[in-house]
Amino acid sequence: MTYMNKTLKEIHEALKKGEVTSAELITESLTKAKMVQEKCNAFVTILDDVNEETVTDNILSGIPYGAKDNYSTKGVLSTGSSNTLKDYVPFFDATAIKNLKKAGAVMIAKTALDEFGMGGTGTTAHTGIITNPWDKTRMCAGSSAGSAASVAAGVYPYALGSDTGDSIRKPAAYCGIVGYKPTYGMISRYGLFPYASSMDHCGVLTRCVEDAAIVVDNMKGQDELDMTSWNSSNLNLENSLNGSVKGKKLCYIKEICDLNNYPNASEELKAHLANFNKTIDICRKLGIEVVEESIDRTLLEAEPAVYVVLSYAEATSNLSNLTGIIFGPRGKGEDIFAMIKDHRTQGFSPLIKRRFVIGSYVLQKENQEKYFKNAQRVRRLLVDAWKNLFTKYDGVILPVGSGPAKHLDKALDILSANTDVLEEHLQIANFGGFPSITIPNGFIDNLPVGVNITGNCYDDANVLNIAYALEQAMDYKNMIAGERNE
Amino acid sequence: MNNYKAVIGIEMHCELKSNSKVFSAARNSFEELANCNIQPLDMAFPGTLPVVNKKCVKDAIKIAKILHCQIPEYMTFDRKNYYYPDLPKGYQITQNTEPVGINGYLEIPFKDKTITCLIHDVHLEEDSAALEHFFDATLINYNRAGVPLLELVTEPCFHSAEEVLAFLEYIRLVYQYADVSEADTKKGQIRCDVNVSIMNEDAKELGTKVEIKNVNGFANIVDAINYEIKRQSELKDNGRYQEVEQETRRFDEETGQTFRMRSKVDAIDYKYFAEPNIPKFKIGEDWVKEIEKEIPTLPLERKKLYTEKYQLSLTDTNIIIKDKAIADYFEACLKMGIKPKTAANWLITVILGYLNKTDAKISEIYMTPERLKELTDLIDKGVISSKQAKEIFNHVLTEKKEIKEFINSDNNQISDKDELTKIIDNILNNNQSQIEEYHKGRTNLFDYFVGQVMKETRGQANPVLTKEILTAKLQKDN
C-alpha cells in the first residue's frame, strides 16, 4: 500500500484510523525521494534522519512535504541552489516553515530551483539540471522545478514553492499538477530568500486544489516580521471550496489566446489553444459565464520587458548581501572588495550575472527615468487593466505557456513566433499581487498542459473555488507522472 | 590672504534614542561588548525583512515639526545601494524621494542676536556597522548596524565656522530638549559632512563646492571648515582657483588638514529606488497633532522669557537653559510661586553645585521645587535665616527627610513673642543711655540692640521678630 500518491485528506484519514504511522509515511516518502533524485535530480537535501510527528486533528500533522531550497530552514542546509550559499545552514526558520511545523507537518527534503528563483527552466541550480518526471528529456520549467518534479512524481502530496514571475504556476503546468500563489502578503515572506521583493510570493504545489487550500490555510497569517503581510484569520480556504460556481463570470483575453495572433503557429500551440477552448466549454457547462475581452496589444507586449526591468533591478539590490563576508564561502583577494568580487564571480551562474548587469543598468541615474520609472508606470497600467477586468469578472482564465514542457535541448523545440505574451502573462499576477492558480487541463503528445485562473486581491476563496469546480469537471486531478498517458 | 565670503552647508547625522533599532528588534544601546545587539536583519541574513520602528518615525516627525518643515502625506523609504564592508545588506534604507521633513527653518542664538538657519530636509535612516581597524586586521561590530539615524541637511546658509558651531550646539540642545537623542558627541552619536565654498563678496554665483565627509566632534568641524576656507582662499589669491574641484575630501585630525578622497567624476551612483518591503503608510493629521503636543518649549524661547520677563542675567539664563531638566526645575519653582531671581540663585549657587559634586540628576534629588518653596517661605517669614536654610537644604538632600523635621530638632530659635519681649525689655532697661542716643538720631544703634539680643540668646532669637519688637518698643518709648 502506498500513501504518498494520495490526497492529504485520504492520508490523514489513514493516519487517524491507524492504517499507517507517520514514521511509515516518512520512510515511504524518503524512498521515493531517492528514486526521484536519481531520475530527476530534484533535491538539494534529503533529510534521512527526520523525526516523525504526532498525529493531531490538523490534516497536515505527521505527513511529509518538501520545501524549496530558498526557504530558510533552521539547522537544515538552505542554498537557494547557489554556490554563494552552498554550505549555509540558517539558524532561523522562515515564518511559513514555522507555521507548518506548528501544524505538525514533516519536512523531508529541500528541493532544487533555478538559482535564487531566477530562471524559468530548472537548469541553473548549482546541483545541476532538474528533469521532468513525465519525460527526462524535457524541463520542468522553473524556478520551483524540484518542488514540481517531486510532487508530480509522488514523493509527497505537496511542496512549497515561491513565485516571482510564474515560478510556481508554470512548473505546475509542465508537471501536470496544481500550483497556487495566494494574494501578496497572505503568506509571510520572512525567511524566503528574496529575488524581487515587490513580486515575490510564497505558495504551494499540490496534486489537487483542495490540498492547495489546506496547505495555504496552514502557511498563511499576518507576521510581525513582514510588514507586507496582512491578517487573513477570517479566511478559511478549505471551507470555502463548495464547488458552486453557477453565475460566476470569467473572461479570457483575445490578444493572448486567439490562434489568429500566431500566424506561424506550431502544431503544439494549435493543440494547446484548442485544448484551452475545450476547457472554456467545460466552464460554460458548469454555469460559468465566460466572455472574450480585449486588451491593448501594445500594452501586453510591453509586459515581458517590464518584468525584466523591475525584477532584475530589485534582484541586483536584494542579492547585494551575498559578499562571502558574513556567510557563504570567503572569496580570495588583496582587500575586502577583491574578496567580495571573487565570491560573487565564483558563486553566481552566468544567467544571474546577466540579470545583475541589466538590473544595475536600469537603476543608474541616467537610465532610471527611461527604464525603471517607465517600467513602473507600465506595471501600473497593466495592474489597472486587470483590476478593471475584476470589476466585471470573478477572474481571468488563460492557458499557461504555449504548450507542454519544452525540451532541455532547445534544438528539439519547434517554437512559434511571437508567443512572448502567451509565455509571460502570468507575471501580471505578480505585478498586482493577485491570487493565481494553475491546474492541469489536458495532454498534448502524452505531456500535461495547464490552465490558469487569476482573480482580484483578497478574493482567493473565490478563485480557488472556481478552480476546484473546474478540476472536478475534468479528469486530471491527482495525477502521478508516468502513471497515465493520454 | 583676501577675505572671501564663505558659503557652508552641513549634513548632520544624529543617532536617535529608542529601545530597539529602526528596522529590527535588536536593542539600541551603546555597548562596550562588540556584536551583542544583533538580530538576523542587522547582519542581512537571507530572507530577513525590515520592520519600521514607530517610535523612531514619531521622533523624526517631532524634529521635522520643530524645524518648521513640510511633512509628506505618506511615510516612504528608499534604498541607497552601494558595497562597503560596514553595510551588511549592500544597501542602506533611507529616505530619498520623500523625506519626513522638507523646506524648514530654525532660529538659533548667535552671539547676542539670533540668526535663521534654512533646513533643506530631515530624514530617517539606519546607521552602518562600525569598522574597527587594527594593525593587521579590521573587525566589524554590528551593534551599530541599524541604529536609527536622523539626517538633517541644511541649505548652504552659513558663512563662518562660528555660525556652524552655534547651529550644531543649538540643534544638539534641541534634540535633547525634544528627548529624541542623547546627542552625545563623545559616543559618536553626531557625525557631520560639511560643504564649503568661497566667493567674492559681491559675486552672484556660488563658488565650487567641496565636501568634507564624516567629521567627528564639533572642534574638528570648526577646524575642518577653517582649514578649507583658508586652502581655497589661498588658491584663489594665487590665481589658482580652478584647482578647487568639486570633490569629496576627508579631514585628518592629526594634521588638521583635508585630503582628497574622490572627485565628482568618481561620485558613486547610489541607484536609489523605493524600498519594496516597507509599504508606504499615511502620516495621519491626528498623529502629527499628538506629536506636536509633546514638543517642549525650546531653549531659545525660554531664553527670551527668562531674560525679558524674569529679568535674569544672560549668564544665569544660559546656565539654566543648557539642560532641559534644569530649566524645567526652574519653571516648576516659578509655578510654585518662588520669585524668579530667588529660584535662579538657589539653582545656580546651591543646587547645581550639589549636582556637580554628587553626579545626581536634578529630576531625582529630594529637594523638589515643592520643598524648595517651603524652604524659601521660611526665610521670607523670618523663621530661619538664609544661612540656616542652606544647612537645612543639605540635611534634606542627604537624609531625605522633610524640612520641618530639621526646624524642630536642629533649630531652637526663639520665636515666642512673650519670651522675646521679656529679653528685649531687660536689655532696653540696661541701656538707657543708648536709647537716648538713638532718639537723638543715631538710628544705626538699632543694630546694636539687635546685636545685644542675639548675644543674650546666643544667636537664637528670631531675627525678624526681634526687629519687629524692637521697632515697636523704641517707638513707644519715644
Image (cartoon, coloured by chain):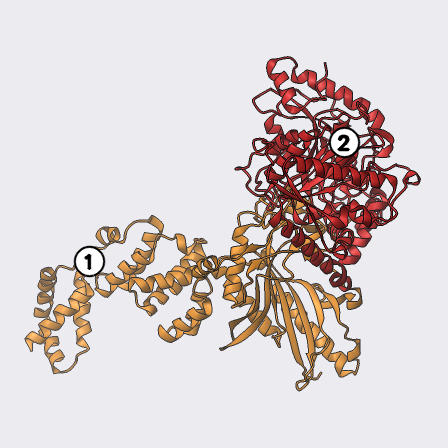
Left or right of B358 on screen, residue A118: right
**Protein chain holding label 2:** A
Give the image quarter of residue A39: top right
**Residue B360, x across and y down, in percent:** 43, 53
**Protein chain holding label 1:** B
Alpha carbons under labels 2 and 1: distance apart: 104 Å
Q: Amino acid at mark 1?
A: Gln
Left or right of B42 on screen, residue B27: left
Count of marks overlaid on the render: 2
The colour of chain A is: red
Left or right of B137 on screen, residue B461: left
Residue in the foreground of this view, choosing between A132 and B233: A132
Asked if residue B275 can be seen in this view, the reply is no
Q: Verify CB contact (< 8 Å) between mark 2 and mark 1.
A: no
Asked if residue B78 can be seen in this view, the reply is yes
Callout 1 crowding tier (Cα within 10 Å): few <14, some 14–19, many ≥20: some
**Which residue position holds label 1?**
B413
* In this view, A73 is above or below B108: above
Residue in the foreground of this view, choosing between B355 and A440: A440
Q: Secondary structure at mark 1?
A: loop
Q: Amino acid at mark 2?
A: Gly
